[in-house]
Amino acid sequence: MPIPVPAGVEVNIEGSRVSVRGPKGKLEREFNPEMKVTLADNVIRVERPDDSRQFRALHGLTRSLINNMVIGVTQGYSKTLEIHGTGYRAELQGATLVLNLGFSHPVVIEPPADVQFQVNPRANTLTVAGIDKQVVGQLTAEIRAWRPVEPYLGKGIRYVGEHVRRKAGKAGKAI
């Protein structure tokens, strides 16, 4: 499946290294040298040397990663987390995220390059936004890992829209 290159996006292919520059920033990545990546008429195409299982898998991976790079530099990616629990909150101090999650100390998280945090304290929501899909997803998962949702009271950090199965508890009472 060809990848269309929108206006305002510059793609540079040097051997197996692909760099994409757009309005939101620049991403660069090295791919398997056996995958042939070409740019013609504002369309990026990925071709594989043969139909072996390994090259079919690499073909789809390479195409998907390049497509994510193009989307990242044009629209960007974001993930939103909800914080539930008495006294649990998030706040920004400059660009640094400070989480109070019931520990004896606050959790301080420095954002990597090209990643921004947005905090809405009234709704107890936290948004992680950036141009690299992998970095945004990994950072969001690391934040969530500080206090995963527990099944009895539902306290913790969860993705917006995430369903948490609740347990009845020791007495088996209805919640």
Image (tube, rainbow, N blue to C red):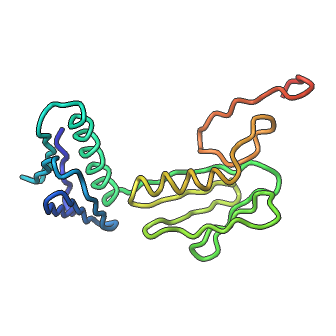
Residue 46 on image: x %, y % = 16, 45
Q: Residue furthest left?
A: 41
Q: Is residue 162 left or right of residue 60?
A: right
Residue 107 on image: x %, y % = 70, 65
Identify which residue is drawn at 89% across, 24% down.
173
Residue 93 on image: x %, y % = 64, 75
Q: Quadrant of the C terminus?
A: top right
Q: Is residue 140 left or right of residue 32?
A: right
Residue 140 on image: x %, y % = 55, 53
Badge count: 0
Q: Is residue 41 left or right of residue 4?
A: left
Identify which residue is drawn at 71% across, 42% down.
149
Q: Residue furthest right?
A: 171
Is residue 168 positioned above or below 33 on the image? above
Q: Is residue 139 left or right of residue 17?
A: right
Judging depth in this view, the residue of 17 and 43 nearest the camera is 17
Identify which residue is drawn at 86% across, 24% down.
174
Identify which residue is drawn at 49% across, 51% down.
137
Q: Quadrant of the N terminus?
A: top left
Is residue 62 positioned above or below 93 on the image? above
Judging depth in this view, the residue of 63 and 51 nearest the camera is 51
